[in-house]
Image (tube, rainbow, N blue to C red):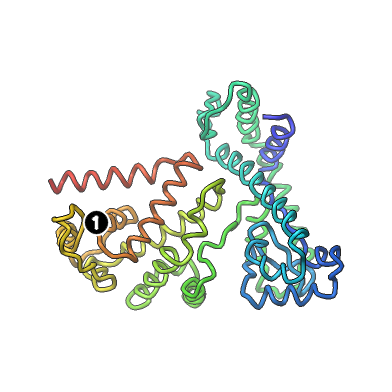
């Protein structure tokens, strides 16, 4: 670990903030390329395509039309931008932004693991909290990070962070010129935004089911209203959520390479909510919504089929809720329906990412242990 990287990490540990991604201004970019007159039409086309998500593509305050994009936003809007910029101008920018995004992800994952580490491990200098094997020549730098994290958890430094956070929120409020009813949401978002761990991905995607799910939640109290859903509204939510998370945007998250622990944690929370909501259904309702595949030759080929699924369903009371997220996952493991299979794959993917990238083995181990217990009870 070089000195610059170590110093940067210690600075972020002290401030209690994650590293921010780099954004570029569309108007400035086109101006430098001699295409200033086309900046507004370009931004209008990006907006008309429904690509503005407030995360990777957002409005550049105080302009009413100008946009700012990060590496992921650039990839989404690349076809539109290439209508105004030559590939030899755009591609180096995309490569530079992607490299910065990967670097920031690595930095933030390290900060994430340090924050999640318990005090006992930090005091013992246990390098396992970093979730990877540390080279001998990097051990001194890694231990310095553990000491810094332990030091800045003390009360005086926590007060220092809180004061800086309040100052940041105050600056946002001083520049605010909107209606009074938006003050409370603004303060909440500004407070979260200070640490840099606010929403960093749009897991619902931009497909038709994702858009329908957002509209549905908007009219039913948002994410907080999911627990109150019942009857037909509960069925509608489950149907749209399974389509959205299970099939519509799986390619966006099932990629190789560096993944952000912040995004993984957020996606885990969202998919867990969907699984727990499915768990409020009874097996009878689930079979009605997702009919079992009509394949009957599983015994011949040594695979799961209709009869295997029906036998597995007998382990669950027909008219009682299925249970929590892990109970639902265990049922899906034996259930033959492609929509639910894709949903289970997303659950498996996200708990696997928690284990690999975030050093959190809990959800994955719990799933396998619970399934093994059920299999042992059956035998």
Task: Classify the position of the C terminus by image quarter.
Answer: top left
Is residue 236 or residue 296 the one in the foreground? 296
The answer to which quarter of the image holds residue 25 is: bottom right
Q: Is residue 377 above or below residue 24?
A: above
Residue 147 drawn at (x, y percent):
63, 28
Task: Classify the position of the N terminus by image quarter.
Answer: top right
Residue 167 drawn at (x, y percent):
75, 52
Residue visible at 61% across and 42% down in the picture: 106
The answer to whether residue 207 is visible is yes
Residue visible at 49% across and 75% down in the picture: 208
Is residue 82 or residue 235 the one in the foreground? 82
- How many discs appear? 1
Q: Is residue 120 above or below residue 352?
A: above
Residue 351 drawn at (x, y percent):
42, 48
Question: Pointer 1: what residue?
Answer: 334
Judge from the rendering whether residue 240 lies leftward or rightward of residue 328; answer left or right: right
The answer to whether residue 169 is visible is no
| Secondary structure of the residue carrying numbered label 1 | loop
Residue visible at 61% across and 31% down in the picture: 150
Circle 1 crowding by C-alpha within 10 Å: few under 14, some 14–19, many from 20 = some
Residue visible at 67% across and 62% down in the picture: 74
Residue 126 drawn at (x, y percent):
52, 26
Q: Is residue 343 above or below residue 121?
A: below
The answer to which quarter of the image holds residue 327 is: bottom left
Q: Is residue 13 above or below residue 259?
A: above
The answer to which quarter of the image holds residue 360 is: top left
């Amino acid at each position: 670990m070089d000195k610059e990287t170590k110093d940067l990490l210690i600075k972020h540990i002290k401030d209690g903030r994650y590293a921010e991604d780099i954004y570029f201004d569309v108007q400035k970019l086109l101006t430098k390329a001699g295409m200033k007159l086309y900046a507004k039409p370009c931004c209008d086309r990006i907006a008309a395509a429904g690509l503005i998500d407030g995360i990777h593509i957002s409005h550049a305050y105080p302009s009413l039309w100008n946009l700012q994009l990060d590496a992921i936003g650039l990839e989404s809007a690349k076809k539109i931008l290439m209508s105004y910029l030559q590939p030899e101008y755009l591609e180096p920018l995309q490569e530079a932004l992607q490299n910065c995004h990967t670097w920031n992800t690595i930095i933030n994952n390290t900060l994430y693991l340090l924050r999640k580490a318990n005090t006992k491990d930090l005091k013992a200098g246990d390098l396992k909290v970093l979730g990877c094997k540390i080279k001998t020549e990097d051990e001194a730098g890694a231990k310095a990070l553990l000491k810094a994290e332990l030091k800045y958890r003390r009360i005086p430094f926590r007060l220092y962070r809180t004061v800086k956070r309040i100052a940041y929120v105050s600056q946002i409020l001083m520049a605010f010129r909107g209606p009074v009813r938006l003050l409370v949401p603004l303060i909440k978002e500004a407070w979260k935004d200070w640490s840099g761990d606010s929403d960093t991905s749009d897991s619902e995607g931009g497909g038709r089911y994702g858009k329908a799910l957002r509209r549905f939640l908007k009219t039913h109290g948002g994410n907080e209203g999911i627990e109150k859903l019942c009857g037909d509204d509960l069925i509608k939510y489950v149907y749209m959520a399974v389509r959205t998370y299970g099939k519509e945007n799986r390619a966006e998250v099932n990629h190789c390479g560096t993944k952000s622990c912040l995004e993984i944690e957020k996606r885990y929370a969202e998919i867990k909510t969907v699984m727990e909501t499915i768990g409020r259904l009874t097996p009878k309702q689930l079979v009605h919504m997702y009919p079992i595949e009509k394949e009957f030759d599983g015994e011949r080929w040594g695979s799961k089929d209709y009869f295997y699924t029906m036998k597995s369903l007998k382990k669950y009371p027909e008219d009682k809720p299925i249970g929590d997220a892990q109970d639902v996952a265990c049922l899906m493991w034996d259930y033959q329906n492609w929509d639910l299979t894709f949903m289970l794959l997303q659950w498996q993917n996200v708990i696997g990412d928690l284990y690999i990238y975030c050093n959190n083995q809990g959800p994955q181990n719990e799933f396998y242990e619970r399934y093994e217990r059920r299999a042992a009870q059956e035998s």
